[in-house]
Amino acid sequence: MYEPRATSHAGVVVNELMSFQLIATSPILDWFVMIVHQDFDWWLSAASRAFLPKPLSFFSSRLLPVTTTSVAAYLSWVIFQAILYHFVPGRLHQAPRMPGGRRLIYKLNGLNAWLLTVILGAWVSYAGLARVAPDDKGHFWYDLFNDGELHPRTGQLFDWKHFNASRTGGIIAWTLIDLSFAALQHQQFGSVTNSVVLAVGFRAVIVAEYFLYEDLYVGACVVTIQHFSRNPCHYSKGLPIRFFETLDGAHERFSFYSIFGFAVMMPHLWTLQTQYLATHPVEVSPVAVALLVAGFASGWTLNHIANNQKNMSRRSGGKFRIAGREAETIEAKYRTADGKVHRTVLLCSGLWGIVRHPNYVGSITHTWASCLTCGGGHLLPYAKAILVTVMCVHRCFRDEARCKIKYADAWDDYCRRVRWRLLPGVF
């Protein structure tokens, strides 16, 4: 993850210890969560009582067998997604400028790949080729956790970080995982509850939006592979691009943090709601349904509008209107590693004039609405909401540390004008 590298001896030692701890414990944490919902019926308290007296045997007695079938299935999934990533047609998009000054080209075919994946998965299940059923039972550490290439590539267009984030685990797999557990609930109970419909639908909106904006909104920057190195990029107004302008896409390196997070933890922890509801059905009242839909819609809309305002500001150089009024901006300069100085603007009106991270407020809101579909029986299905809240708060400080280094005095000016990070008057 992006953080300024420590230079003092004490800072290096702390970074090494924290990085080692995260590398060593992240797989164990993910394994523990799986044991809780598979062997202890989602009860954290019961699992903790079994873990504390004999922690080693707690895990060793629940080792999952590595079979030829499981390895072949996962490799087939990765290879299938790599084929889609490389061969499915898509428009070309020129990403924002990297710290070194370059602007990389991406082929955006995610929406088509997602639709093909869901259709093929449904066909495989319908044809009986797969069935829904529960399974049977110096800086070394810092660099390993947090360092690596920014955009490792094979050829001109196969970007490993983008492929890992959007295809091998995380985003494109969510829909298949959710539909599988919805099918499991129907298989076990003969029906699908409205809470499952909400959980599946909410996440499908997030996935569809990700790939829809990745694909259709790439019209903001269309180039051809033969000419991308010398042709200018013409941007349309008001069309936000997601991954490439986020902290993950623009600044995170292809390291353990990125690889393990997207390939393992996000497919597992981010879909705990449907995993839980598959075996613990919850029927939500009509009033609660309306409140959950309203909460999700408000969070999603807030995130969408915030990102849209920010990207319109970047595209237009601050020359646009918000709610009928001219946008207010601060001019900033930054230098890339090639020595060139670039100009940009910091938006300080609209949502970005109220708090510094309004998009995070939206993400936290719609995530909690999604998890609330699980009711109040267990804490574990809320792991995603808790993690997203903690991560967004942490990212506030990470974002601001990066912006302080990049924009210097202009960022200080922005912080004086916009005092609050997430909640006006509170934080």
Image: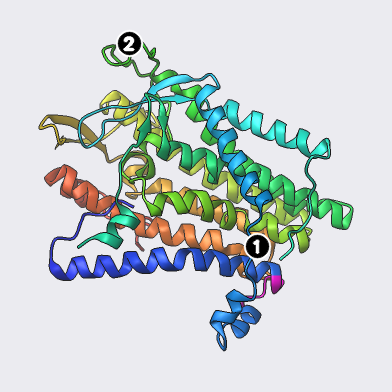
Picture quadrant of residue 127: top right
> Which color scheme is applied?
rainbow
Q: Position of residue 75 (x, y in %)?
A: 58, 43
Could you tell me which residue is drawn at 57 percent across and 54 percent down? Answer: 270
State the extent of the magenta-drawn residues as a range.
39-44
Residue type at mark 1: give it: Pro
Residue 255 is left or right of residue 406, and the answer is: right
Badge 2 marks a residue whose secondary structure is: loop
Q: From the viewer's perspective, is 72 left or right of 226? A: right
Q: Tag 2: residue type?
A: His
Q: Residue furthest bottom?
A: 53
Residue found 41% across the figure and 49% down from its top: 258
Foreground residue among 320 and 220: 220
**Residue 415 makes an appearance in the image:** yes
Q: Is residue 43 magenta?
A: yes
Q: Magenta segment, principal secondary structure?
A: loop
Residue 7 versus residue 354 in the image, above or below? below
- Residue under label 2, please give it: 227
Query: Are there few (<14), some (14-19), or many (20+) residues within 10 Å of tag 1?
Result: few
- Left-right relation of 239 to 209: left
Q: Is residue 299 magenta?
A: no
- Identify the residue shown where x is 54% and y is 82%: 55
In this view, the residue farthest toward the left is 339
Q: Quadrant of the C terminus?
A: bottom left
| Residue 22 as seen in the image, left or right of residue 381 | left
Q: Which residue is mark 1?
A: 65
